[in-house]
Image (cartoon, rainbow, N blue to C red):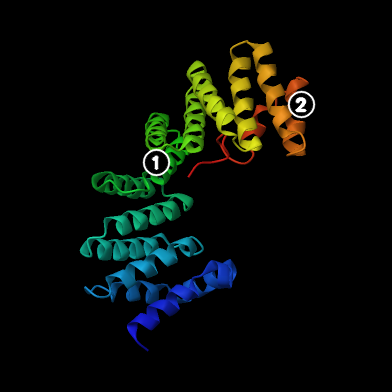
Amino acid sequence: MSEHTRVLDLVQAVDLDEHGAAAVGAWLAAHRAEVVAAVLACDRDTARGLGTRLAAAVWPSARLLRDPRWWTELAEAGEALAIADREPGVLADLLHRAAATFAEGGDRAVAEERWVRALAVLRRDGLPGQDRVLAALGSLYRDWRRLGKALDAYLGLVDVRRDAGDQPGTAAALAEVGTTMHAAGRVRSAMAYFDQADEIMGRTGAAPAEHARVLVWSGRTRWEQGNHNAARNRWSQALALLVDVDEEEANRVRALLAGDLDFPYLSNTSSSPSGGVG
């Protein structure tokens, strides 16, 4: 069997869509050493692209095997090939994939280090993909309660999306800033960012559920400042968007309007009003 065929067979073996999580997880448990060895064996001018392709294909499945030492071996092997092959975009992608796995596994420090490296590579070479890394860093830092760093990441995300002319993405990023400001106790600033997101969403025709979540948060910030009429007005707007779209969410907004201020439900799909960015 040629090396090319061997690597492609390994790529096929870790295809979650084809085999399912249980089968891929069991396969990885038995073949983890072979996978890393195959990546390392590609460290030649004509084969490095094969090795980085294999490493990239493995990362979505790697989380099924809770083995941080193996994750580190896989990460270092793939990243070394991308560096040797002078492929900054590939390197940034591998760093991002590895960081996501480490973050899910609870190792925030390693995830942070790899996402910071990925962002530095993308910025240095002016490559696309900065938005997904900034979104990931913002989420990591906010969950970690490092809110100053989360704000830096999300404000950077606003700038990147605004510069790209991505209005829906800009609105979602502004909502993330608002959520983070709220978590930091800066309610008035949070309200301003939710209002910016609301204005863009209203102008660009955002998905009703996403827009409604921002309006609910906008109402919450007003309620917490004692402006109850304005809060109810925002919730009424949210309800109008949700009727005939999402009855469960509509009922929750009706409960707010009835005085049942069960705000934690706002995080039922994500800690963010936009349902997650990234």
Q: Quadrant of residue 156?
A: top left
Q: Is residue 150 above or below residue 113?
A: above
Q: Can you give x and y, in whole percent of width and height, for residue 174 in the image?
A: 48, 30
* Crowding at mark 1 (Cα within 10 Å: few <14, some 14-19, many 20+): many
Q: Nearer the viewer, residue 98 or 247?
A: 247
Q: Residue at x 68, y 17 (%)?
A: 233
Q: Is residue 70 above or below residue 170?
A: below
Q: Is residue 218 above or below residue 243?
A: above
Query: What residue did someone put label 2 on?
Result: 255
Cα separation, mark 1 vs mark 2, equals: 35 Å
Asked if residue 90 lies left or right of residue 193, the reply is left
Q: Residue at x 37, y 31 (%)?
A: 152
For residue 134, which numbered disc appears in the image?
1
Q: Point out the image quarter for the N terminus.
A: bottom left
Q: Residue at x 65, y 14 (%)?
A: 230
For residue 165, which numbered disc appears in the image?
none
Q: Earlier in the sequence, mark 1 or mark 2?
A: 1
Task: Say which amino acid is labelled 1.
Answer: Leu
The residue tagged with tag 2: helix, strand or loop? helix
Q: Can you give x and y, in whole percent of width and height, for residue 235 in the image?
A: 69, 23
Q: Can you give x and y, in whole percent of width and height, for residue 72 in the image?
A: 35, 60
Q: Can you give x and y, in whole percent of width and height, for residue 47 in the image?
A: 28, 75
Task: Say which amino acid is labelled 2.
Answer: Ala
Q: Is residue 246 above or below residue 74?
A: above
Q: Nearer the viewer, residue 19 or 263?
A: 19
Q: Nearer the viewer, residue 244 or 112?
A: 244
Asked if residue 145 lies left or right of residue 127, the reply is right
The residue tagged with tag 1: helix, strand or loop? helix
